[in-house]
Structure formats: structure tokens, C-alpha cells
Image (cartoon, helix red, strand yellow):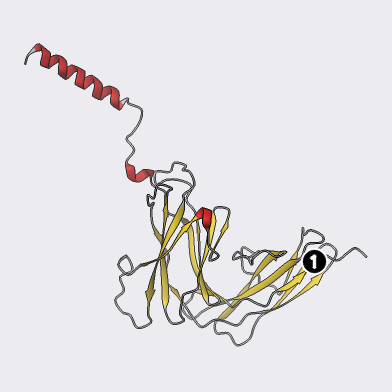
Amino acid sequence: MTQSVRTSLVILLTLLISACGRKGALIYPDTLLPAAPALVSAQQSGAVIKLQFSLPVKDAGGRTIQEVAGVKISRRTTGSEQKGICRSCMTDYQPLHVFYLGHLPAAAQRFGGRLIVADSDVTAGNSYSYSIVPFTADGIDGAMVKTGDVPVVPTLLPPALSVDCQPTEISVRMSAPSGNAGRFIGYNLYRAIGTTVRSYQPLNSEPLVHREYTDTQLERGVTYRYSARALFVAASGTVVESAESEEVAGKLKDDE
């Protein structure tokens, strides 16, 4: 080996070592992708299915990322007579929505880092499951998450509502409907302020088991609109929300 060749090899090795820099473990490209959405659930609500999930804030390697640009949602429909469904396969999933967080349609509502999507194109007797994939502003897909099957039953009857307005609080009274199939377990109560759209997210985090709910820390002169859905456990074991009640409105009374 000539001196010039030896010199070239030394220079090449030096460059390779300096390029590595010994600055830490190598990061594989897959770990830079957004992690899968978390806290995922899907539930029948009246005649629609509500799909809920938290947007990822970290990549697959656990590092904090900038906000994802949107999500892609696909859906699998299973008829009551279908047999031999592959639960882990993706071949039966069809694209349903591509949502950009900066331009959400009426079918989707955002609550901080959480998204609630209403799928209205469902039919009683079928079951539906969903896959959710976040994507970056560069159009790079992150990790996928799937829901379980949601069997859809005929729409359940809604509860009845009334309000009692006092100077410092508004009490909402709910009456469970009769004639619905399943085991009654409580209510979800929804509130809108002024002329804003109805929220997909209830006021309560757990089913309300009592017939009356007292809403406090309200602003004087503001109109509050309430609606409710009754919750039942269906024969399949899934929890189903009834249709939405008629809306009732109230505002704090003036001090007497």
C-alpha cells in the first residue's frame, strides 16, 4: 500500500468518525413519526356514532412534537350476517374522512387536545369500527390506532327536561324515557351558551345517576341551553346514548 493511499484512508476514517460525532444513539426515522392517538373510544349516540380521541403530542420515540396537521379516519362496516371477519386486517377499511385541524367541518369538534367526530352514515343492524392516523404538515402519516366494533341498534327515545332558574344557579331536571331496550344507567347533560352550536361533549365526566343537576358559576344575563341523552347498556354489552332531548333554556334570575 502506497503512502498516498494510506493518507487517503486516514483522512476518510477521520471524516467518518467526526461525522458520527458521538452525540448519542442513532434515531431511526420511524421514531420521528407522530405517535398514535390516545384515549380512543367509539359509542352510538342517537342515530350517529361518536368517535373520540386525544391528538398525539409526542413522536413514537417519546419526544415532544409540534401539533399534527390533521387525522385520517377509515371505517369498516360489518353486516349482521357476515362471518369470518379478520379483526386485525386493514383490507376491509374504507377511507371516511381527512380532517385538517385548522379547518374542521361541522361533523368534528375540538376540545383542547381532544377531537370528537360524529359519523351519521350508519345503519341499525350493522357494526362499525374505525382506524385513525395522524399526519404532519408535510403529509407524513404517524402511527395508527383502531377502535373496537360498535354495533348499532335502533335509536333510543330521549329523556324529558325542565329547568328551574335561581339567582345563583340553574337546576336541570331529567326524566328517563320508558320503552327503551336495555338497562338504564344514567344521563349525559349537554350545555350551549347563547347561540353557539350544541356541544358533542357533555358537562359530566361520568353518567349522572340522579334526576337533577345543579349548574353553578354561571354569568348573569347569559342564556344557557341544555339538552340530555339517556344512557343504556344494550344487549351486546355496549353503552348506548339515546336521541337528544328537546332543548330547554334558562338564565339566572335577578335577585329579589
Does 118 sit left or right of 227 as displayed? Answer: left
Q: Position of residue 205 (x, y in %)?
A: 61, 63
Q: Mark 1: few, some, or many residues within 10 Å (few <14, many ≥20)?
A: many
Could you say which is closer to the camera, residue 59 or residue 195? 195
Q: Quick one: which residue is furthest to the bottom in this view?
A: 179
Q: Secondary structure at mark 1?
A: loop
Image label count: 1
Q: Position of residue 77 (x, y in %)?
A: 38, 74
Residue occupying the point 33% across, 80% down: 82
Q: Quick one: which residue is furthest to the right in this view?
A: 256
Residue occupying the point 32% across, 65% down: 88
Could you say which is closer to the camera, residue 78 or residue 86? 78
Quadrant hosting residue 228: bottom right
Could you say which is closer to the camera, residue 16 or residue 235? 16
Which amino acid lies under the numbered mark 1 shown in the image of this protein?
Answer: Lys
Q: Is residue 158 above or below residue 35?
A: below
Q: Quick one: which residue is furthest to the top in this view?
A: 3
Name the residue beneath numbered marker 1.
Answer: 251
Q: Quadrant of the C terminus?
A: bottom right
Q: Quadrant of the N terminus?
A: top left
Q: Position of residue 87 (x, y in %)?
A: 33, 68
Does 220 sit left or right of 91 as displayed? Answer: right
Q: Position of residue 39 (x, y in %)?
A: 49, 58
Residue occupying the point 44% across, 41% down: 63
Quadrant hosting residue 74: bottom left
Q: Is residue 60 above or below residue 160?
A: above
